[in-house]
Image: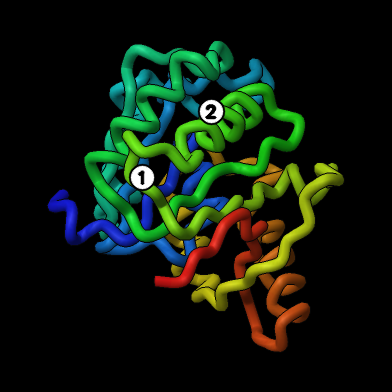
Amino acid sequence: MEKDKVKDLIIAPHADDEVLGCGGILGKNSFVYYCGIDESRLPVTDHRKNLTVDERQAEIRTVADFLGFQWAWNPDTKVNHYKEIELIPVFERIINELRPERVFIPIPSYNQDHRAVYHAAEIALRPHDRNFFVRKVLVYEQPDSIVWEHKPFKVNYFMPIDIERKISAYRLHKSQVRAMRSPETMRTIAALRGAQVNCKFAEAFVLERWVEQ
């Protein structure tokens, strides 16, 4: 993607986090960086097929084609084994290459990968004379962060969305759809956030930095 075409960089710990947290804003000016892509291992009671990394990437390509964003991932990082010190230079490189207007990072919640990605991104986004300075930094929600709220974070920025488009995109991550992150849960959360700001459906974020041009 050309540098001047990137408005939003979304850093996703796992494939599907980008749609769950930012599906409403993803489009042709968005770039998603997946920190890792793992094979889908389902419990024995689940009769769906386990997917390989290649098959998971095929799901991502389908989602990206539907929403219009570009993406990349790091094959050297393994899901559930993220290390902040290894992620920081990777994030710095991507930010310096793309020079985005906004960066969206995951709420740390109680997921170890989300915490590692959040803290590494915070360091990579610090004001530094060697790095591109991103003026707008937002933290996006996940369904589990609402079910079991991460208390230091309180949403304070909202964007109206097309919930049908978001749900349609999420359904393309076929191997990831399940109860706590079901389309019904997504619709309920979006309706709640919409009610808070007088619109039908919305996504909510924690605004960490916003510097006017």
Amino acid at dot 1: Val
Q: Secondary structure at mark 2?
A: helix
Q: Secondary structure at mark 1?
A: strand
Looking at the image, which residue is at 73% across and 61% down? 155
Q: Is residue 58 visible?
A: no
In this rendering, is residue 139 above or below 115? below
Amino acid at dot 2: Ala
For the residues labelled 2 and 1, the Cα–Cα distance comes to: 16 Å
Q: Which residue is mark 1?
A: 32
* Residue mark closest to the camera, 2 vs 1: 2
Residue 96: image tag: none
Looking at the image, which residue is at 50% across and 15% down? 85
Density class for disc 1 (Cα within 10 Å; few <14, some 14-19, many ≥20) is: many
Going by the image, does 74 lie left or right of 140? left
Looking at the image, which residue is at 45% across and 22% down? 87
Q: Which x, y percent locates residue 36?
A: 42, 24
Label whose residue precedes the other's in the sequence (2 or 1): 1
Going by the image, does 192 lie left or right of 66? right
Q: Which residue is mark 2?
A: 120
Give the farthest residue toward the bottom: 198
Q: Which x, y percent locates residue 138?
A: 56, 55
Going by the image, does 200 lie left or right of 65? right
